[in-house]
């Protein structure tokens, strides 16, 4: 797999968000897309027009699951919010937190115990 592409209205904003959140780096930017590296993982924020934000919960959509230790979940949530994410109003399970990135894509903060 080359990477995961995320449609959005502002590819620079979304790339910067994920680079900050995941301690990654923006590798390249064009007038329509931006690539982010997080270790060996690649995300591509691609501008589409018109862009329609995903609905959560709603239709089947791909989302990212970001892991942390259970005791680190509150700090990880705070970091996501500082970077520009918001908690989704619908939370299906108390064991993890569904967040929405600046483009409205859901992603989960999922604690994984060793």
Image (tube, rainbow, N blue to C red):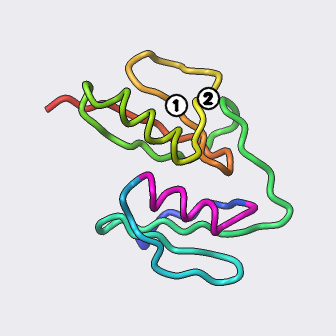
Other residues around mark 2 within 10 Å, as few (<14) / some (14–19) / many (≥20):
some
Residue 108 placed where, x, y %?
Answer: 46, 36
For residue 18: magenta?
yes
Instruction: Please determine whether, in this image, residue 78 is positioned above or below residue 16.
Output: above
- Give the quadrant of the N terminus: bottom left
> Is residue 45 rendered to the left or right of residue 114?
right
For the residues labelled 1 and 2, say whether their Cβ atoms are less than 8 Å apart.
yes
Q: Residue at x 58, y 80 (%)?
A: 29
Give the magenta-colored segment's residue range. 9-21
Residue 81 placed where, x, y %?
Answer: 53, 38
Other residues around mark 1 within 10 Å, as few (<14) / some (14–19) / many (≥20):
many
Instruction: Please determine whether, in this image, residue 59 is positioned above or below residue 30.
Output: above
Q: Residue at x 48, y 41 (%)?
A: 80
Instruction: Please determine whether, in this image, residue 33 is positioned above or below residue 19.
Output: below
- For the residue labelled by badge 1, is the local secondary structure a helix, a strand or a loop? strand
For disc 1, the marked residue is 98
For disc 2, the marked residue is 88
Q: Residue at x 19, y 29 (%)?
A: 113
- Please tell me which of labels 1 and 2 falls first in the chain: 2
Q: CA distance from mark 1 to mark 2?
A: 6 Å
Residue 43 placed where, x, y %?
Answer: 48, 65
Q: In the figure, residue 55 lies in which quadrant?
A: top right
For residue 49: magenta?
no
- Give the quadrant of the C terminus: top left
């Amino acid at each position: 797999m080359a990477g995961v592409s995320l449609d959005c209205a502002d590819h620079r904003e979304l790339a910067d968000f994920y680079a900050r959140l995941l301690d990654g780096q923006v590798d390249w930017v064009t007038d329509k897309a931006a690539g982010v590296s997080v270790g060996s993982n690649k995300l591509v924020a691609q501008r589409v027009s018109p862009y329609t934000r995903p609905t959560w919960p709603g239709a089947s959509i791909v989302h990212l699951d970001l892991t942390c230790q259970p005791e680190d979940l509150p700090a990880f949530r705070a970091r996501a919010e500082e970077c520009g994410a918001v908690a989704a109003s619908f939370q299906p399970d108390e064991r993890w937190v569904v967040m929405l990135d600046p483009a409205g894509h859901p992603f989960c903060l999922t604690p994984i115990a060793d």
